[in-house]
Image (spheres, rainbow, N blue to C red):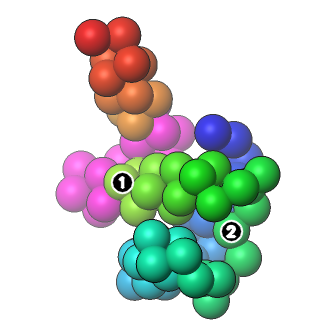
Amino acid sequence: MKIPVIKKLVENFTLSELENAENAILEENKPAIEVEGDDEGEQLTHVMAAIWIQKEMQKESIPFAKALRAYTQKVRVSIGG
């Protein structure tokens, strides 16, 4: 997971574009938008993170940095427990 890639996705694409990219990757197709990553798994991770962060930003009316912190805390909890 690369934070700069996630930030770029959040800043440059709509939620709809990100969701379409997620579906394309899940269906083993090339997404219409450029998603950086070493492989499809990493690309999917980046897109899923960007989607979660965008939704959190809208729902909570918070900036990217705060939503990113919430996401990384969520990931840490899921890995650690």
* Residue sitting nearer the eye, 57 or 22: 22
Residue 52: mark:
1
The magenta-colored residue range is 54-69
* Residue sitting nearer the eye, 43 or 61: 43
Secondary structure mostly taken by the magenta-highlighted segment of the chain? helix
Q: Is residue 65 above or below residue 22?
A: above
- Residue drawn where x is 39% and y is 19% of the image: 79
- Residue drawn where x is 72% and y is 47% of the image: 4
Q: Residue furthest left?
A: 59
- Please identify the quadrant where the C terminus is shown: top left
* Residue sitting nearer the eye, 24 or 62: 24
Q: Is residue 46 visible?
A: no
- Say what amino acid the circle numbered 1 marks: Trp
Q: Secondary structure at mark 1?
A: helix
Q: Is residue 26 above or below residue 30?
A: above
Q: Which residue is mark 2?
A: 35
